[in-house]
Image (spheres, rainbow, N blue to C red):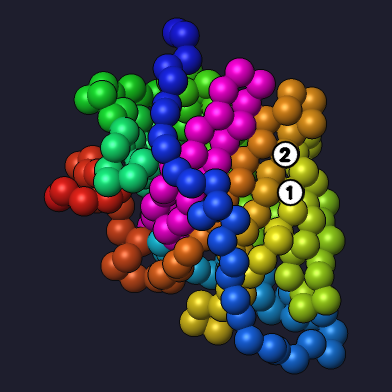
Amino acid sequence: MAPARFVLVLSAALLLGACTTGPRPLPDDRERAWDEARAQLRALDGWRAEGRLAVRTPDDGAQAHFTWQESADGRFALRLAGPWGQGAARLVGGAGQARLDTGEGREYSGPDARELLFAVYGWDIPVAALRRWLIGLPGDDAEYTLDRFGRVATLDWRDWSLEYRRYRQQDGLDLPALLIARRAADGVALRMAVDSWQLGGQPAAVPDSPVPLMGGG
């Protein structure tokens, strides 16, 4: 199937918008601080992130607003849209099944969310790994470094390299505000700026029917 073009208009300047945080004390032991934070991240029973992303491939590029929701039962929903809800698309998955609803009203399904994104939009992105990366968890098979606060600063996983440029605090937990992922072998790059986080409970529930990211109902 030839990749469909997913054209979403978003100002690049917004994607580079600053995330301001107040001064904070350095931990006495950053490794211990990371161990405590990692345990909290692993214990999350659901979360919701909203922000902006940009994807660059050798043949194309796209920018979008996104909402990512994770539920305690392992399901997720990723919604993408341009300004005013233009080109809304929705990817849901869990338990070995994924479904992609496009802004043109088409629906695709299969066992792997990564394969769906690549088949429809030409984005070869490791969705399963990204679900961990977005909250700052490197995964057991990744190599990573910590910053002076005991948060993940860089991450290397297989052929992907990540940088965590900014964090923000939510409910006493440091969560990524800006991350950049690159795959040098083919020039694929992903940039995600998170504007808001919600942790646990109802905000992470995954609805059963597709809805636009912005506007509408």
Picture coordinates of residue 87, whole percent (x, y):
31, 33
Q: Nearer the viewer, residue 87 or 12?
A: 12
Whether residue 32 appears in magenta in the rendering, the answer is no
Which span is picked out in magenta?
49-76
Q: Given contact means CB atoms under 8 Å apart, are the residues at marks 1 and 2 in contact?
A: yes
Left or right: 32 in relation to 125: right
Secondary structure at badge 2 equals strand
Left or right: 174 in relation to 48: right
- Residue position marked by numbered label 1 in the rendering: 162
Secondary structure at badge 1 equals strand
Q: Amino acid at mark 1?
A: Leu
Picture coordinates of residue 63, whole percent (x, y):
49, 39
Picture coordinates of residue 207, whole percent (x, y):
24, 50
Q: Is residue 189 visible?
A: yes
Instruction: Say above or below: 1 vs 170.
Output: above
The majority secondary structure of the magenta stretch comes to strand
Left or right: 105 in relation to 98: left
Q: Residues within 10 Å of mark 2 (few under 14, many from 20)?
A: some
Q: Amino acid at mark 2?
A: Arg
- Residue position marked by numbered label 2 in the rendering: 182
